[in-house]
Image: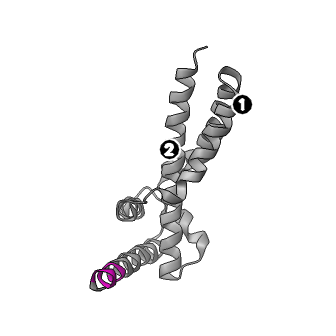
């Protein structure tokens, strides 16, 4: 088996894993800024976020295939580089907040009106705090 398809598959599942991580990070920041319990972040995440765990399993399977078809150092490199890159990669919180708002407003979420209202208020508080922080940075 050629190692190229394995690397492509690993790249795709790593990208999805990174995207899910960034969504989770944005949801946690929204909870912190708005004073919600951290457990509430699960309600803000889109339904397809459930692919995060299978993605991580697929990533490990790809890592094993890289170990078999390429070498152990390539496997270590493939597993360490994304973890090391996470703190350096920018997170588009504004786009993630918009995705979360669309999810909360959707009728398919199963949230009652009160829960949806609380989550939408939390998203608005986060956006307001974000704008305020941006204006403070600009004033410096």
Tag 2, which secondary structure?
A: helix
Residue 30 percent coordinates (x, y): 47, 73
Q: Camera-side residue: 101 or 69? A: 69
As displayed, is residue 69 above or below residue 108?
above
Measure the C-alpha gap from mark 1 to mark 2: 24 Å
Q: Quadrant of the C terminus?
A: bottom left
Name the residue carrying label 2.
16
**Residue shown at 48%/50% (left/top)?**
19
Q: Nearer the viewer, mark 1 or mark 2?
A: 1
Residue 48 percent coordinates (x, y): 49, 48
Name the residue carrying label 1.
72
Residue 37 image-quadrant placement: bottom right
Residue 115 percent coordinates (x, y): 48, 73
**Residue shown at 53%/22% (left/top)?**
5
6 horizontally vs 126: left or right = right
Range of the magenta residues?
A: 132-138
Tag 1, which secondary structure?
A: helix
Of label 1 and label 2, which has the lower sequence position?
A: 2
């Amino acid at each position: 088996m050629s190692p190229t398809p394995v690397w492509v598959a690993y790249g795709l599942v790593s990208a999805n894993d990174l995207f899910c991580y960034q969504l989770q990070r944005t949801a946690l920041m929204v909870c912190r800024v708005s004073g919600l319990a951290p457990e509430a972040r699960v309600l803000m995440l889109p339904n397809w976020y459930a692919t995060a765990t299978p993605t991580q399993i697929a990533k490990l399977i790809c890592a094993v295939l890289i170990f078999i078809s390429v070498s152990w150092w390539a496997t270590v490199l493939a597993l360490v580089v994304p973890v090391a890159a996470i703190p350096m990669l920018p997170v588009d919180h504004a786009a993630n907040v918009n995705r979360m708002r669309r999810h909360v407003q959707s009728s398919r979420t199963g949230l009652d009106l009160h829960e949806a209202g609380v989550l939408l208020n939390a998203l608005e508080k986060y956006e307001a705090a974000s704008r305020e922080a941006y204006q403070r940075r600009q004033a410096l």
